[in-house]
Every structure is written in C-alpha cells, then in structure tokens.
C-alpha cells in the first residue's frame, strides 16, 4: 500500500490521560481523502485534545494517530491548514508580514508567500490594509486574515476547530465558501463544531465523541438511522392499529408521528394502515436531525452531570 | 542538525524587532542620554578648568597672614596681595568690604587648614579665593625647592611603567585583563537589557493565541532556539548602539571626561582566556535565556513572569558584591560556591578568567556545566512551552506538565 492509498487520517485506540484524568479512553476513526468529516462532541469531551494529539502538540498516552500514514511532524505543516479553537495573530506586526511569516513556515518562498497573501487580501477586500498592523484591523478583518493564514499553500488537510466560533455572519459565509472551495479543490476537511446544520450541509461522515469513545461513527444517514431512523408524519382519520413496523410517538386528533424502527418500507406501512380502515390523508417521512441526536446523546450526559 | 525553519524564525524575530520605532527609541535613549551627559561633562570640565585657571590669576584685593613662613611675598606681590599683621582686623576688613579676601596660613599647612575669608560673589565665583590661596602656597614651595625635577618628584606626577612576568614570560597586566573582561560586559549588557524580552518572547505567542498554529509548522525547539539566537543578535545590536557614545567620548573627549589613556595597541588577546571567555559567555547566555523562556512559558501574563524574573536577575549581580574576594582569594569557599552554582557561575567564572585565576580544569567544568544545564533547561523550556503555551489563562502546573511524559 502506498501512502496515498489509505485514509488520510487514521486514529486507532487513541487514549489520552492528563495525570489521573482520562480525557479520551479509546477512540478510533478514519478520515478518507477528499471527504468533509464532522468531529462532534459536547464541551470537554476531548475533541480539541484529539486534534492536538493528532498534530503532535500533545503526546498521546496510547494509540495510533497518523496523517498520510505516519505521525504528523511540523515539517509536514505545509500541507496542513489548521484553524485552532484558540486562535490569534501577531498583533503588533503588519498583516502582510504575519501572512508572509506563516507562508514561509509552510514552505513557501518569500515572494510566493507575499504574492499569495496579496492576492488573498485583495479577494477579501483587505488589499489596502496589508501594511497595517494587525491590531489596527477590526475583529472581523482579523478573522479574514486568520482564515487566509489557515488556507495558505492550498492544504491537503484542513482542520477547523470550532471554525465559526466568534465569526460574524459575513465571515461565517466566507468561511463556508472557502470550505466549499477547498472541498472542490480536493482538500480533506476535518471540522470540529457544534453547528449541526453546518455538519448536515457540509459533512460526508461524522463521529460523535462521548465519554472518551466514539458514540456514533459513519455517514450522516447511518448515524440518523442509529438514532431514531425515520419518522412518519401522518394525517389520517380512523383508528391507528398496533404494528410491529412502527411505534407511535405522537398522537393528536387526525395527526400522528411514528418512529420506524427498521428500514422503512413506506408501501408496507400504508397498506397496513389502509387494511386497518384508516383513511390516509397525507403520508411523509423525515430523518431525525443531527441536532436532535446531539441533544439526545449529550442531553442525557448533561442531565446526569446535573444530578 | 539542520532545524526546519530556524532561519525563518530568526529573520522574522530580528527584522520585526529592528524595524520597530519603539525598539530604536528605547535603544537610542541610553546613548543619547550618555551623549548628553558626555556633552555636559565636557563643557562643564572645560569651563571648570578655564575657570580654575582664571581663578588662579583672578585680580582681587586681599591680605594674608603667614605663621608657616613658607609664603613667598614676591609671589603674593605679583597677585596684588599685601601682608597683614592682625588676622582679626583683616577679617573685619573683609566683612566691612575694605578688601575682597584674607588668607590665614597656619604654622603647618600640611596638618592645619588654611583659612580663607572672602566677600560672597556666588557659589561658583567664591572658588577663586581658595584657588589663589593654594596657588600662592604651591608656587612658594616650588620656589623654595628651586628645582623643577625635584618638584615633579615631590608632586609624584612622574611616569611609571610596570613589567611583570608569568611562567617566565612577560604578562600583559591590565592589558591582558581587559579583552576577556569584555565578555563579562557583553554578558551583563545582553542579559540585563534582554531579560525582560526573553521572558516575554514566548508569552507573546501565548497571549496572542498563536502557539497552536506555530506548533503545527515548527518544532518548539526550533522556535525557542530561534528566539534565543535572535535575542542574542538584538542584544549585540543594542550593545553596539550603547557603545557608540562611549567610544566617541573616548576618541574625542578623553581628557575632558577624565577617561584613562588606554593604548589599545597594547591590549593582549591571549587565545586561552579569549576562547574560555567566549564559551562561558555563550553557555551562560544559553542557560539564562532558556530559563527565562521557561518562566515565560508557564506564566499566563507578563506581570506574572516579571515577579519570578527579579530573583533570577539578582543572582547575576551577587558575585559582584564579592569581587574583591574573587580577585584576591579565588580559592575561598564563597568564590568556589559562586563559580559552580549555575546561575552565578557565568559571572564569577568570567571575572576569574579575566584576572587569570580560573584554571583550565575549572573552566572546562564550568563550561560543561553551563552548556549541559542550558540544554537540559532548553528541553524543559520546550516541554513547558508545548503544554504551557496552550494553557492560555492559567499558570501551568509543573506536576501536570511532567505527568504527561508517559
């Protein structure tokens, strides 16, 4: 197997202890090349710790954490775009100097780093601010610079830890556009986020981290199936029969919601209802949202914590 | 070993510091202040000398009484003075403004003070009375000796040249001490000037939340090493800036500044002490810098770091309090203790190296100790930085950091 054959990110049996405190117990997942991957979990569940261990900032207590088939080294930083949760820039330096410095650290020559930075700054309407000190920019403008530093050198892997945290709506849109561009350009994106609508919109697969292990792992559809699968929304008249194929979760006058436990066969359920004398006025199915799953998984955890 | 991106870090750190207006304002403040002081001293000395000279020959009316018999009336006459017979009356005449001054020479002017009474002409102009009184006695004494050579000998203003020998060879004396002492000066200047900057250097990454982005492109050892190297370069630049007015003052105003006449061509650059001095300087700098960087790595803010900085700085000044023992009795317990205690070793060893009392064995031990500890502390600093710098708001627990080493 060549380095390019396997998953881009491979994490297996990762464990992280801080003294007596075990933050991540036994975590395994892979991220395939070119996919956008959601890394989900409640606050303090160990997501950032996992990212830091993956990037060699922390030393893992146990387990394998590989990028491109080997542990990450700073020398590989040129192919990485990392937007950490705790982020900032050298405030007293000029925008272009900061961007050039990071470009140089990522392996670009000075002229290339300057050229890339100027092009990016023009694109985000900061071309005239290149010589200003970073702390003279508004926080929104600083966020744009931060994003530029993150995606310099067209990274093969983009790791975004809570990417929209603190971003204003304009920059959030810019970020989403950039993620989309990077996806199209073939980058692999790892997103750590609480924004479930972003995950549903952007991510191909996700892992939910809970109590230091993967609570759920797979495509969004697979995870939805794992947590409640499909919900039937039914408008009807008559009396709903009992069935092994569904469970009524909400019953109102002429309206019901039914959780379908197995892979749903809509025709079978409709036939069953009709044969029981139910007049079906409308029949629709929806998947449970990731947000509902999140609340279901971590809400229980929070409830326990609050007890 | 080639460090990935070390050059990038060094050039970034050096250029961004040297291109800051604030840096040059702070740096040039000292030489400008020195230049101003030198200017003031020069002009003050010039005016003082000319004033003293002119005061010697000031024309004013005065009387004198002489119990010693050393005063030559002819000398007094050339200055326009007259002899008085009653000192009490002469003083009364001064008070009444009849004469400007009266000098009362005692029986033994070497043991008893010569009393000078005069009309007040302001604090600076009043000096002329004592100047003239002294001039009269000095000239009278010279006349009494009657031989210029004897006078010079008596005054002790004749030149003496010393030649000493060490291991059968002529030693350089002070000319051999000065060059290696330069390393001590460099050490002090660099550490004192940059200690704060060293402790703050990694705090900047921490306070600006840049650390994680840096650590994914740069090995922390490279970052710390880059900071240390760049600080050393910046320190040398600052030192050069500070040295300029001193060198200028020496070259152009040496006499006015009462600076010693050093014939630099006689300076002796012995290879042994120079190499040892350079190694102790680099070793000591490494140990101090890495220690300061480590402090910066675990402290959440500059203020917290500053509190720990002060005691460390005291350690490099402690050996200076015992400089007389360091020079006269280098094998005493105190000097030996300071020679080998890591944070006083550099200063003590540099002093002893300059004065020639540091044996090669002692030098080797100190150098090995400084470099060895420097590397160990560098590793600790890197580890603290790796964990401490992403502990953004809390002081880092050393126990927690080293517990991660599993």
Image (cartoon, rainbow, N blue to C red):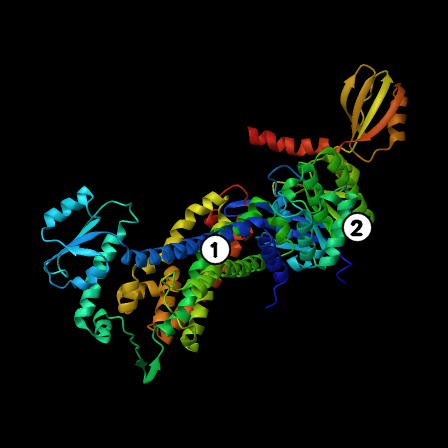
Residue A107 image offset from top left, x and y in percent:
70, 59
Q: Nearer the viewer, residue A170 or B241?
A: B241
Image height of A280 relative to B268, above or below: above
Q: Residue at x 22, y 65 (%)?
A: B139
Residue hosting label 2: A34
Residue A56 image offset from top left, x and y in percent:
62, 54
> Looking at the image, do the residues carrying marks 1 and 2 touch, with CB atoms under 8 Å apart?
no
Q: Residue at x 49, y 45 (%)?
A: B302
Q: Quadrant of the N terminus of chain A?
A: bottom right
A139 to the left or right of B44: right
Residue hosting label 1: B31
Q: Quadrant of the C terminus of chain A?
A: top right
Q: Chain of mark 2?
A: A
A212 to the left or right of B342: right
Q: Secondary structure at mark 1?
A: helix
Q: Quadrant of residue B318?
A: bottom left
Q: Secondary structure at mark 2?
A: loop
Q: Is residue A31 visible?
A: no
Q: Residue at x 76, y 21 (%)?
A: A250
Residue A219 marker? none
Instruction: Answer few, some or many: residues within 10 Å of disc 1's Cα (few below 14, many 20 plus, some between 14 and 19).
Output: many
Image height of A275 relative to B79, above or below: above
Of all residues, the one furthest to the top in this rendering is A253
């Amino acid at each position: 197997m060549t380095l390019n054959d396997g998953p881009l990110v491979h994490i297996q049996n990762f464990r992280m202890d801080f003294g007596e405190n075990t933050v991540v117990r036994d975590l395994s997942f892979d991220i395939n090349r070119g996919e956008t991957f959601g890394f989900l979990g409640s606050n303090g569940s160990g997501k950032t710790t996992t990212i830091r261990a993956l990037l060699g900032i922390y030393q893992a207590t146990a387990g394998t954490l590989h990028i491109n088939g080997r542990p990450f080294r700073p020398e590989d930083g040129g192919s990485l775009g990392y937007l950490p949760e705790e982020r900032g820039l050298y405030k007293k330096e000029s925008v272009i100097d900061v961007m050039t410095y990071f470009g140089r650290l990522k392996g670009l020559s000075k002229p290339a780093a300057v050229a890339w930075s100027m092009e990016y700054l023009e694109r985000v309407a900061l071309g005239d601010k290149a010589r200003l000190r970073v702390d003279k920019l508004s926080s929104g403008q600083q966020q744009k610079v931060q994003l530029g530093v993150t995606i310099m050198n067209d990274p093969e892997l983009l790791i975004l830890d809570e990417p929209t945290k603190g971003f204003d709506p304009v920059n959030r849109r810019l970020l989403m556009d950039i993620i989309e561009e990077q996806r199209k350009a073939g980058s692999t994106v790892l997103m750590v986020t609480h924004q479930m609508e972003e995950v549903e919109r952007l991510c191909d697969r996700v892992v939910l981290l809970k109590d230091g292990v993967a609570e759920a792992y797979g495509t969004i559809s697979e995870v939805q199936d794992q947590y409640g699968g499909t919900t039937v929304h039914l408008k009807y008249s008559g009396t709903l029969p009992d069935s092994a194929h569904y469970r009524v979760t909400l019953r109102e006058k002429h309206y019901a919601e039914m959780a379908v436990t197995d892979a749903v066969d809509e025709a079978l359920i409709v036939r069953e209802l009709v044969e029981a004398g139910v007049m079906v006025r409308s029949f629709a199915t929806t998947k449970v949202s990731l947000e509902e799953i999140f609340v279901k998984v971590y809400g229980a955890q929070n409830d326990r914590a609050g007890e | 070993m080639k460090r990935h991106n070390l050059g990038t870090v060094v050039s970034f750190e050096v250029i961004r510091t040297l291109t800051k207006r604030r840096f040059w304002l702070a740096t040039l403040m000292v030489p400008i202040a020195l230049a101003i002081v030198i200017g003031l001293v020069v002009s003050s000395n010039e005016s003082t000398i000319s004033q003293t000279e002119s005061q010697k020959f000031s024309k004013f009316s005065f009387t004198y009484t002489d119990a010693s018999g050393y005063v030559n009336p002819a000398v007094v006459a050339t200055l326009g003075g007259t002899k008085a017979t009653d000192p009490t009356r002469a003083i009364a005449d001064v008070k009444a403004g009849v004469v400007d001054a009266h000098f009362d020479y005692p029986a033994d002017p070497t043991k008893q003070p010569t009393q000078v009474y005069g009309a007040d002409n302001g604090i600076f102009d009043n000096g002329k009375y004592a100047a003239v009184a002294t001039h009269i006695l000095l000239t009278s004494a010279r006349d009494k000796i009657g031989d210029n050579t004897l006078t010079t000998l008596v005054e002790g203003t004749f030149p003496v040249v010393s030649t000493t020998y060490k291991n059968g060879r002529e030693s350089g004396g002070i000319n051999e001490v000065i060059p290696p002492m330069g390393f001590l000066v460099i050490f002090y200047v660099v550490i004192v000037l940059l200690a704060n900057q060293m402790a703050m250097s990694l705090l900047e990454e921490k306070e600006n939340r840049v650390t994680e982005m840096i650590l994914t492109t740069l090995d922390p050892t490279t970052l710390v090493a880059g900071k240390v190297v760049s600080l050393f370069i910046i320190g040398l630049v600052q030192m050069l800036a500070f040295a300029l007015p001193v060198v200028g003052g020496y070259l152009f105003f040496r006499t006015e500044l009462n600076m010693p006449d050093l014939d630099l061509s006689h300076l002796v650059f012995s290879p042994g002490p120079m190499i040892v001095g350079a190694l102790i300087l680099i070793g000591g700098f490494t140990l101090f810098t890495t220690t300061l960087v480590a402090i910066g790595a675990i402290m959440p803010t500059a203020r917290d770091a500053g509190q720990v900085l002060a005691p460390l700085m005291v350690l490099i000044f402690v050996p200076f309090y015992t400089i007389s023992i360091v020079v006269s009795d280098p094998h005493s317990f105190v000097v030996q203790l300071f020679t080998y205690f890591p944070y006083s070793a550099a200063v003590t060893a540099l002093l002893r190296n300059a004065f020639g009392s540091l044996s090669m064995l002692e030098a080797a031990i100190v150098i090995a100790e400084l470099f060895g500890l420097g590397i160990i502390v560098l590793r600790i600093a890197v580890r603290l930085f790796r964990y401490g710098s992403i502990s953004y708001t809390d002081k880092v627990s050393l126990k927690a950091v080293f517990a991660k080493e599993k």
